[in-house]
Amino acid sequence: MKNKIISTWVYLDSEEEKSKYPNNSVKAASNSPEFQAIYWRCVIVFFKTSLLFHKEHKHILFTNTANLPLVNGFNIETFFQENNIEVVTVKNKYPLPNGYFNTFRNQFFEFSIIEELSKSIGDSDNFLMLDSDCIFRESCDFLFEKLDENGMALTYVVNRDLKYSINGLNGYQLKELFNEFGISSTEPPYYSGGEVLLCSGKFVKKVAQDFPALFQQLITRFKNDELRFNEEAHVLSYFYYKYKALIGGLDEHIKRMWTNHNYYRNIDPKDVYRSIWHLPNEKGLGFERMFNAIVNNKIEFENHEDYVSYAENMMLNPKNHKTEYIKKIKQSLLRVATKIGVKK
């Protein structure tokens, strides 16, 4: 019987691994309980919204810790047991050396997950792994059906401007690297976002087989100060092309939604109809409020429309982010200074 697996992951930094993460409302060290609670709240909300539509599917949390904490008095282990969510503990086999890319050292933890999963997944099984700051608007079974038609993977292209640099590489630099790693193409490839991995078990096994050797090549290129894949989405983008995934097959169904108008807001009215919402700005706001509703058993809905309305208000309402007037004034002054040539 074919399995449909829905998963997310959380990696807890040690003292030696602590990093600075963008889009997190807590400024504490990444190995502190206060900081890590942000991600645990996201995990609970992620699974709760999935269970609204996918109770019959297998749910897995991948993590590098064997200890599930209490968050605001909420017992995460009990929540997982009550909802048949499996916890798979994975060791990070591919830590990055200091200075590889910014301050991140766990960029390739996802490939330890893939390697562990490859031991048990069937070739035709469907696997969906999302960042924990995602929620579901509706059932994704139709996406599993679309995946079956392709047989390997579907991807989300974040930006189709090939000159746009994402995490240090643009499309033309990706083309150069793809060529050096055996994929020749006349056109630059697109970068597919790392927040979603929707693939077959067959794809999982191929990546698990290929990545260890690729990792060693990347470390060598780092030591030689050569162009390299900086993070997991660069690597996955390479494997998507290598194994003939449907590039952009998820573009209509998921979006990286920036919701804080004080910095950048890209919400379109049609976004509410997307099946999966990726909400980096909401880790410390919308997710915390939905988590509190779960803790207080206030997240049950009479119908789908009520749920969507609730989720839209929690996550997409521009009024949720109070206007930072001082920041707005500074931005306006900077634009004026740049325009008149005082600052470049």
Image (cartoon, helix red, strand yellow):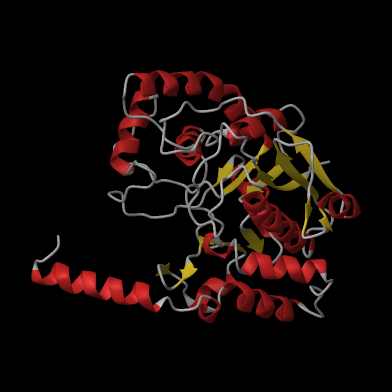
Camera-nearest residue between 5 and 266:
266
Picture quarter containing residue 123? Answer: top right
On the question of residue 321 being in view, the answer is: yes
Camera-nearest residue between 323 and 62:
323
Q: Is residue 103 left or right of residue 171?
A: right
Q: Is residue 282 above or below residue 8?
A: below
Q: Is residue 187 above or below residue 313?
A: above
Residue 170: x, y in percent?
32, 44
Residue extending furthest toward the left: 341
Q: Is residue 328 above or below residue 238?
A: below
On the question of residue 137 being in view, the answer is: no
Picture quarter containing residue 200? Answer: top right
Q: Is residue 164 left or right of residue 247?
A: left
Residue 76: x, y in percent?
81, 52
Q: Residue drawn 64% across and 40% down?
A: 11
Q: Residue drawn 76% across and 71% down?
A: 293
Residue 71: x, y in percent?
76, 56
* Quadrant into which the C terminus falls: bottom left
Residue 197: x, y in percent?
59, 45
* Quadrant into which the N terminus falls: top right
Camera-nearest residue between 227 and 103:
103
